[in-house]
Amino acid sequence: MKLFLDSADVNEIKKRLSSGLIAGITTNPTLIRKSGGNPQHVYQELIDLGINDISMEVIGDSEEELFSNAMGHVKTYGDKATIKLPCSVDGLKACKRLSDINVRTNVTLIFSASQAILASLAGATYISPFIGRMDDNSLDGMKLINDISNALTGDTKILAASIRDPQSVGAAFSLGAHICTVPVSVFDKMYKHVLTDKGIEQFNLD
């Protein structure tokens, strides 16, 4: 069981790393654009903070382009790079090539158990079902986690993504997720419970 932060805001990430509870970082082009950072600078800053598992999304219009861009990241960032690929025909072909040379991969935008099975067969290290986006479209994100957990038999880990609240973290782990990646705001809320606050207040008073 591991927690990743889903963020590209280096300052916000740095504040949470001192907890010792964060095992990795997931990023995407949208998060990096919102942070106002340059992808290469963001990745290097995260590595300098001591993060050893960073999902770096690669783009391309073909298997060859995706693979080539992935190898560029591997050359620059070494084993700190987890190559994030889309669950598409070309993405899975690139995933298989990368897994054959022991490059860590994260197949993203998973919305069905059948997609998860294909990604696992392609040797993906992680697969990322998007819980929140499923729920946004009147689909059951938690059922998807459960279905994937029941279907997979190999070494591929379920990395639950698009998580919107702390309750979803507990539910995803209980249904078979190995990792949850959460926004900073959700991570902060995981500490909180009104009964805990009341209990601390009473204990301090006593």
Image (cartoon, rainbow, N blue to C red):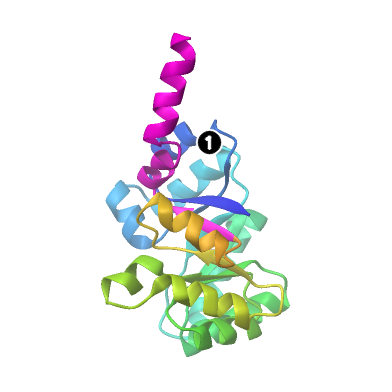
- Residue 11 placement: quadrant: top left
Q: Which residue is mark 1?
A: 17
The residue sitting at the top extreme is 206
Q: Nearer the viewer, residue 56 or 126?
A: 126
Q: Is residue 63 visible?
A: no
Q: In the displayed structure, does residue 189 sit left or right of residue 97?
A: left
Identity of the residue drawn at 52% across and 51% down: 4
Quadrant holding the N terminus: bottom right
User: Residue 100's quadrant in the figure?
Assistant: bottom right
Provide the secondary structure element on which disc 1 rests: helix
In the image, residue 173 lies in the stretch drawn in magenta: no
Please name the amino acid that badge 1 sits on. Leu
Quick check: 87 left or right of 117? left
Q: Residue at x 44, y 42 (%)?
A: 190
Q: Magenta region: which residues?
A: 179-206
Of residues 51 and 58, which is closer to you in this image? 51
Q: How many marks?
A: 1
Residue at 58% from the left image edge and 40% from the top image edge: 21
Question: Looking at the image, is 108 positioned above or below residue 64?
Answer: above
- Count neighbours of disc 1 (C-alpha within 10 A) and say few if under 14, some if 14 to 19, many if 20 or more: some
- Residue 192 in view in this figure: yes
